[in-house]
Image (spheres, helix red, strand yellow):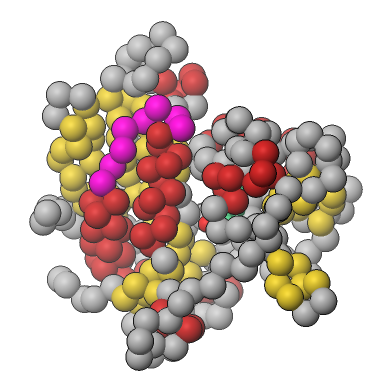
Amino acid sequence: MRIPISKTASPKTKPEDESRLGFGCVFTDHMFIADYDDARGWHDARVVPYQPFSIDPASPVLHYSLEVFEGLKAYRHANGSIGLFRPALNCERFNRSAERMCLPQIDAALQLEAIETLVDLERDWVPGSPGTSLYIRPAMIGDGARLGISRAQRHIYFIICSPSGSFYPNGIRPVRIHIEDAYVRAAAGGTGGVKTGGNYAASLLATANAKERGYDQVLWLDARERRYIEEVGAMNVMFVIDGALVTPPPTAVSSKASPAGACWSSPRVSVCKPASGQSASTSCFRPIARAR
Ligand SMILES: Cc1ncc(COP(=O)(O)O)c(C=O)c1O
């Protein structure tokens, strides 16, 4: 599909000091939007200037959190080229999240094309300093005036981009982590394994309490026994034990919903396999070729 692009008439000034970007504070000039309803499916895919959109005050996203999102990054390589880190996996996970939250599926190829089109247009926004990247945030919300607790009538899929630095405001110094044994992030059968907004709202209190006590983040434990490690705040966790890197399996986000996955019954390391002729460090990246 050729995605129509309306370019902004008033481009923003790009941040000069990449060391002060922070996380998710600055947004690029454009965004991608597509609409969905049952009659037409996904339609009107377009790139437009970054802007607010209006939704009905009775929209299910505002009352029942009918929402899912993803987070992925475009990096500027040393030679100036731009690569997305394993974007296809984010597109697949987006659809797994959507299924759990009764939101419509959106073809992974369309998601990828939307991301690539937007990043190509915004390529000058991809920072190049060490520790920086263009953070890409696809999201889907349930729209339409209906307060009954049911699937939404309409949906909006959109993508925004934010040049970002470290997730931690003070960088990695290293960070202090509080082992959280009161609140939990995910329970078997729940929605902890999908990327939906409510999970993050529910995690804020524990994180705020930890910050008050001088910690940067919390380490979540399993909901049933508070014995097994799950993840740190909103990120994965890895340990080096006897020289081996131990981390939850790549599918842990979804396997958290299953009792077997909750306790790392089979710790594994996620490894990108280089395609022939590529080195391991470049094979995970999908290049953004200059199209326009
Ligand atoms: C709950 C949670 N776990 C882990 C991660 C790490 O991200 P990814 O699974 O994309 O590597 C994130 C990122 O947003 C997250 O929100």
Where does the image place residue 150, in percent across and percent down from the top left?
Answer: 40, 15
Q: Is residue 106 magenta?
A: yes
> Is 239 placed left or right of 104 in the picture?
right
Where does the image place residue 266, in percent across and percent down from the top left?
Answer: 67, 57
Residue 85 is drawn in which quadrant?
bottom left
Q: Which residues are magenta?
A: 100-107
Count of numbered labels shown in the rendering: 0
Q: Is residue 154 magenta?
A: no
| Above or below for 277 versus 116 | below
Nearest the viewer among 291 and 273 is 273
Where does the image place residue 132, in percent across and percent down from the top left?
Answer: 52, 72
> Is 79 placed left or right of 250 in the picture?
left
| Above or below for 239 versus 4 | below
Residue lying at 78% horizontally and 64% vertically, measured from the top left:
175
Residue lying at 57% horizontally and 33% vertically, measured from the top left:
191
Where does the image place residue 271, in percent across and percent down from the top left?
Answer: 54, 72
Residue 230 visible: yes
Quadrant in the picture for the C terminus? bottom left
Residue 201 visible: no
Residue lying at 40% horizontally and 27% vertically, measured from the top left:
102
Query: Given the current orientation, which residue lies at the most extreme top position?
Result: 148
> Is 256 placed left or right of 91 in the picture?
right
| Above or below for 156 versus 75 | above
Query: Given the current orientation, which residue lies at the most extreme right position?
Result: 213
Residue lying at 18% horizontally and 48% vertically, measured from the top left:
46
Q: Could you tell me what secondary structure mostly forms the magenta stretch?
A: loop
Quadrant in the picture for the N terminus? bottom left
Nearest the viewer among 240 and 52 is 240
> Is 257 placed left or right of 28 in the picture?
right
